[in-house]
Structures are given as C-alpha cells and as structure tokens.
Amino acid sequence: MSATESYLDKDFVVADADCRIRREDNLMAYEMQGGDFKRIPQGSHIRIDAVRVVPTGSNGQLIFGHAILNGTPVGWTSTRNLEGRFVNETLGEVAPEAGASRYGPNAAWSRGKYIGQKTLVSIVDVSLHVERIALETLDAYVRLVDAARADGVSVAINSAFRSYAEQKILYDGFQHHLPGYNKAAKPGSSNHQSGIAFDIPVAGAAGHPVYDWLTRHAPDHGFVRTVSGEPWHWEYRPADAAQAVADNTFKVPGIA
Ligand SMILES: [Zn+2]
C-alpha cells in the first residue's frame, strides 16, 4: 500500500474508446501499430506502474500513466482515458530539501509568519492538474473522499497548498488588476500557505450535493468551514471540527 502513490495499488478501467498509446520518448506523439494508432481496448482493466506530468501551454498539465495489461507493459497513455480520470490520485511525496528557505516550495506560513517546512503530497485536482497537500492531512482527506464516494458524492479540490512564490503571483496579479486574478491575501498571510486549507468546488453552496454532504459530514473527518463568504474553503482542524460536531455545526464560530 502506498498512500502517497495511490495509483500503484489500483486497477483502472479504460473508459475512452480511443485510448491511444503515446511514444515513450515523446508523450505528445502517438505510437502506431499496423498503420493505425496503438490503443488499449475500452473496458480493459489495467495497472499503472509509473506516472509522468507534462506541462502544456501557460498553466496546463497533462498526466500520463504507464499501463500494464494482463501483466504486460503496453506503454504510456493519458490518465484522462481512465475511469475516474485520476482525480484524487496521489502522485508521490515532495519532501523539503535540507536547509530549504522560508520562501521555498515546501515552506509553510501562517498569519504572516514562517512556521516551518512541510512534506507535501502531489494530488490530482478536479481540473486534472496537480496540486499539493500537506502529508499530515492526507489520511483525513482520503477518508473524507472515500466517505463521500460511499454516499455517491464526488469530493475533489481545485486549490490546496500554496508556496510563498505562488501566493506572491496571485497577490501581484490582484494588485495590478490582471485579468483572471481575484482578491488574494498578501504572501505569508494566505491560509493556503499553512498546509491545512482545501478549496472544494461546491458551485452555489447550499443545495449543491457536495456542499450539502460536507455540511453534514466534513466535521466528522476533521474538516470545518473557516471563512465567511467562502463556502468552498474548508480547513483540516481536528480540534475545531470536534467542537463543531459537539455544537451541531460545520463552521468555526463567527463565520457567515
Ligand atoms: Zn481557499
């Protein structure tokens, strides 16, 4: 079992009728076979024994898995071809480097103060991009996702841990009114830098199946709402969640 490389433990079903094999030396190109694309048949059960993430364009990413069919390697294919599309699969740990700076990729901040280095885990978000969450939150998040799935509800994230540099880009974009940038906290002050924040898409909140499920069950798994007016923003705060359960709510006090 590998919690931080979840895909290693699973069977995946090929959902796409046109599941093409990519070239090992160039994942943007296809392998040919007998004058046609080489494909894995729809409905096949495969294993994935390795993953590669390829950046595309300005902000895009494609995730490829190395497929094993009936014990035989058949090559690389897009994980979008698979049932579940790899959402919530973990792709490995990202440990802080020795002597890493407070502005480095694993540096956590809270309320303007550096609070130390976090081991992070790469995880696939709802848009099929790779996010990072703090390793210490992984088990709780997986339990939340599994419990929701058992109730027929798909919980996924669209933003989680942010480094100082990433928050600075968001803040600068906001300050300069750049298109596509929303209100953002100063670098060091975003609650997404501490390693406990998860943005979970809930559309219009109340009435949306994900939101309604979270309001009923998230505190049982250690998650609570912590920001007024941000129904998508949940934090892993076991003590506050236990209090919320006792108080029959899903928010920390004072949140609208
Ligand atoms: Zn948030």
Image (cartoon, rainbow, N blue to C red):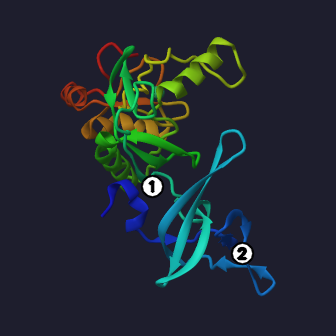
User: What residue did someone put label 1 on?
Assistant: 89
Q: Can you say which quadrant of the picture contains the C terminus?
A: top left
> In the rendered structure, which amino acid carries the disc numbered 2?
Glu
Note whether residue 213 is visible. Answer: no
Above or below 141: residue 22: below
> In the rendered structure, which amino acid carries the disc numbered 1?
Glu
Q: Can you say which quadrant of the picture contains the N terminus?
A: bottom left
Which dot, 1 or 2, sits closer to the camera? 2
Q: Position of residue 58 (x, y in %)?
A: 70, 39
Q: Position of residue 35 (x, y in %)?
A: 81, 84
Above or below 103: residue 72: below
Q: Residue at x 28, y 26 (%)?
A: 249
139 vs 230, left or right, is left
Q: Nearer the viewer, residue 3 or 26?
A: 26
Q: Position of residue 110 (x, y in %)?
A: 36, 20
7 vs 238, left or right, is right
What SS does tag 2 mark?
Answer: loop
What SS does tag 1 mark?
Answer: loop
- How many numbered discs, if any? 2
Estimate how packed mark 1 is, as few (under 14), some (14 to 19) or many (20 or more) residues with alpha carbons within 10 Å.
Answer: many
Q: Which mark is residue 175?
A: none
Q: Nearer the viewer, residue 191 or 41?
A: 191
CA gap, disc 1 and disc 2: 26 Å
Q: Residue at x 40, y 24 (%)?
A: 102
Q: Which mark is residue 31?
A: 2
